[in-house]
Amino acid sequence: MQTFKEGKASISFGQETFFNPKMKQLRDISVSFLNSVDIGEGKAIDATAASGIRGIRYYLETGCKDITFVDIDREVCAIMKKNIKANKVRGTVACQSFQDFANTCNEKFDVVDLDPFGTPSPFVYDALKICKSGTIIMVTATDTAVLCGAQKLACSKMYASVPLHNELCHEAGLRILINYVLRNAAQYDFGIDVLLSIADMHYMRVFIKLDRGAKKAFESVRNVGFVDYCNSCHDFKTTIGLAPEESRKCEYCSADMERAGPMWLGKLRDKRITRDIANDKGRMLDDYGLKLIRQIDSELETPFFYSIPMLTKYLKISSVSTNDVIAELGKKFAVSQTSFDKFGLKTDARISDILKAVKKVAKDR
């Protein structure tokens, strides 16, 4: 049995308990996120609890003062109960499958944390049964190979979407994940407000506030659409709607475009939330986590980005500085770096203007 201290929590875990110390950064961000939203002394559920570290930290470090821990493994639950007691947490342990719990529970929660091993798709529909208007649902996916298009058929099966497998794959995967949550939420007449979205390392995580009402659900669904991607010049075009009929020819180079989706094309974060987390008054985040959140906070809120190495490859010129291209484009257009690719940029400029800026930077160099 090993002991690990994280935040204000101290937990024990053995071989039978899944625990990933490398995910401390994401748990730090989740704690900071909950402290930036108004949940009062809310009721939270750690839906796939394992060691109980997330729920314990929420109790000790946020406003959540009534925590339910769910796990199907009896040995794991025994260790989890010891961790809960050792940290003096007021909590309830349900040793059963999350699906069984959700289908027999009469309670509604203010915070639902769904962080399973692999895909969350089998759990989302049931998780929404214990939600209410105003619930914050946090969903993690670690099946990034699926969402990023390395396993395209699996993505179609698990998420009912066609992914991309190129430089845009992480943003597309994140938007597919949000769309999956939305499509399930809409069946309960929930609309969604995306407060924070992260794609980093081997995971994707979305933080979503639910808003009850058929009208709200319909308004959210109107943010769903497709992206057409050109494998030649690397331009892309997004189209709102579930049955787009527009041409799939690239407007710049006339090549056939690859279509991916359906996916969420709305905002990926709430600036008030990201700004509050980025200020990190309590120094909750390490340097890496702080840099990630500040990058998310500062990037342009427009779907997808352009990878400068892909554009220089298309132009058949040597590499140029992404920062120099951003500076050149910034003279006429809105432009920013992106958290999805350190060599990428988001902008409202057209592909012709971007390529012109790239060529100018190369010439000036």
Image (tube, rainbow, N blue to C red):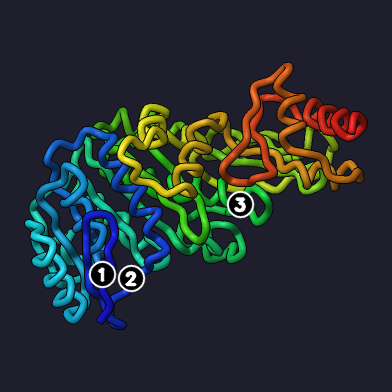
The residue under the point 52% across, 65% down is 154
The residue under the point 50% across, 50% down is 199
Quadrant in the rendering for residue 27 = bottom left
User: If you read the primary sequence from the N terminus, does the residue marked by circle 2 or circle 1 appear first?
Assistant: 2
Of the pair 38 and 6, the residue shown nearer to us: 6
Mark 2 vs mark 1, CA separation in Å: 7 Å
The residue under the point 29% across, 60% down is 6
Amino acid type assigned to the residue bearing label 2 in the image: Phe
Of the pair 12 and 268, the residue shown nearer to us: 12
| In contact (CB < 8 Å): disc 2 and disc 1 | yes
Quadrant in the rendering for residue 342 = top right
Where residue 276 appears, as percent x and y from the top left, is 36, 31
Where residue 25 appears, as percent x and y from the top left, is 40, 54
Position of 40 with respect to 295 (left or right) is: left
Amino acid type assigned to the residue bearing label 3 in the image: Cys
Where residue 347 appears, as percent x and y from the top left, is 66, 28
Q: Dot 1, crowdedness within 10 Å: few (<14), some or many (≥20)?
A: many
Report which residue position mark 1 lands on: 50
Mark 1 vs mark 3, CA separation in Å: 30 Å
Report which residue position mark 2 lands on: 19
Task: Name, please, the residue furthest toward the top.
Answer: 332
Report how many numbered discs are placed on residues in the image.
Answer: 3
User: If you read the primary sequence from the N terminus, does the residue marked by circle 1 or circle 3 appear first?
Assistant: 1
User: If you read the primary sequence from the N terminus, does the residue marked by circle 2 or circle 3 appear first?
Assistant: 2
Report which residue position mark 3 lands on: 169
Q: Dot 3, crowdedness within 10 Å: few (<14), some or many (≥20)?
A: many
Image quadrant for the N terminus?
bottom left
Instruction: Identify the disc placed on residue 341.
Output: none
Of the pair 1 and 225, the residue shown nearer to us: 1
Position of 288 with respect to 194 (left or right) is: right
